[in-house]
Image (cartoon, rainbow, N blue to C red):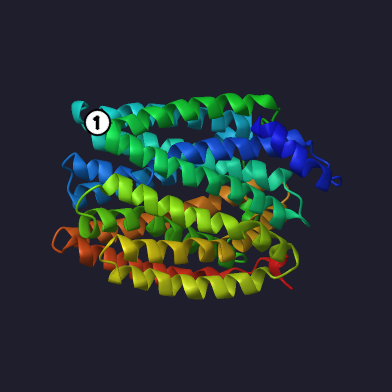
Amino acid sequence: MIRKLLYRILAPRHPWRRVDFSELSEMYLTGFLRTFAIGMVGIFLPIYLHKLGYSLTAILGYYVIFYAVGLLADYIVAHLIAYSGPKHVMRVSFLLQALFALVAVNIQNIPFGLPILAVIGCFASTAYFIPYNVDFSKVKHREHGGKEVGIWQLLEKCAGIIGPLAGGALATYVMPSATFIAAGVAMLIAAIVLMLSPEPVQTRQKLRFKGLKPARHWHAYAAFAFFCGENMISIIIWPIFLSFVVFKSNVFLNLGFVTSISVLVAALVIMPLGRLLDNQKGRAMITYGTAVNACVHLLRLLVTNVAGCLFVAVLNEPNTMVYRLAFIKGYYDEADDYPGYRIAFLTFNEICADLVRLSVFVILMILSLHLSAYFVCSVAFVLAALFSFLIRLERFAALKA
């Protein structure tokens, strides 16, 4: 039903598309389902682990393992994409995500459960994001990419509204493990959706990194790494801060409510921003958005209650869309400039991003051994503010006015 509705609304406006619209709508629907599933458990994972008795150091150690393994997973997944295509790899990621949910529910009964959960979660995440980027960057239209990225983000924001509310309600009124079971079912459905169309890229390719010339295009890799580093702090450290410092009761429900309200506000501005982006305002969007974003990260340090949390979240989400839409469009268009090296380019960017994310969590884990949760999160928010400005290192040709 969702697919038919998307086609009815969007297909008449895209007569110029050379790719069958079912390919793009399939990606929209897949992203919607995964975001819904992750929305139920993703922001709650640190809180879930905290409620099970894991310390802040142990939770941060989970993410150290996650991103350390990611450096290997990026390379393995890239070769799998080159050989079998992005859709086949994404199907595996959904099955791994379902396994991740199963392990999370039984983590206390599994020896070395936390490291095992980190490894499974890492491969599940990597096996989704790299092939999704390869697939979307291949089928999107260069001139109307802003609108297409806007539609993608809008649908994911809608899923981001429903997911946290559903997850918070299940965790509060049923049990926390119920959210992981529901997420696993959604992932299995998403895997089925991916079977609706063939691979968009040539399979059995030979993966090559030699032609990338990192020294010449270092600004693209650096900007993407800091873009991912800032986003990681927003979606992981912020819930940790709220769980350890701000919320004293009803953590799951309060966080789910705040997240859903802020995402709803962001959803209202996505399509106007997409049209603005297609009108060659991308560079200005990044300049303005990253400046405000840096200030928002510093404001997080002043939050002491639900009202303050809601204020910061509502301010943050729409502004994040301002620079995020522009950056993603420029990033995908940049991948078009690497004929024959699309997979290698996107993978090398992910490796650079994992190095930044790993470095941040190593620093935070070491600090957590001797300092309070508030201080550890404060360091993370200051780093996020710095990363916001470093996103401006990008020099994407598609964003030039």
Query: For the point 44% across and 68% down, which residue is it?
Result: 387
Q: Position of residue 233 (x, y in %)?
A: 38, 59
Query: For the point 34% across and 38% down, which residue is it?
Result: 169
Query: For the point 44% across and 50% down, which residue is it?
Result: 260
The quarter holding residue 190 reads top right
User: Mark 1 is on which residue type?
Assistant: Ile
Secondary element type, mark 1: helix
The quarter holding residue 376 reads bottom left
- Please name whichever residue, 398 or 204, is drawn nearer the observer in this view of the structure: 398
Residue indicated by mark 1: 107
Against 207, residue 324 (above or below) is below
In which quadrant will I find the N terminus?
Answer: top right
Q: Position of residue 7 (x, y in %)?
A: 75, 37
Give the number of marks.
1
- Could you tell whether 14 is left or right of 68 in the image? right
Q: Position of residue 116 (x, y in %)?
A: 29, 33
Query: For the point 53% across and 35% down, which residue is it?
Result: 33
Against 126, residue 386 (above or below) is below
Q: Is residue 159 visible?
A: yes
In which quadrant will I find the C terminus?
Answer: bottom right
Against 96, residue 150 (above or below) is below
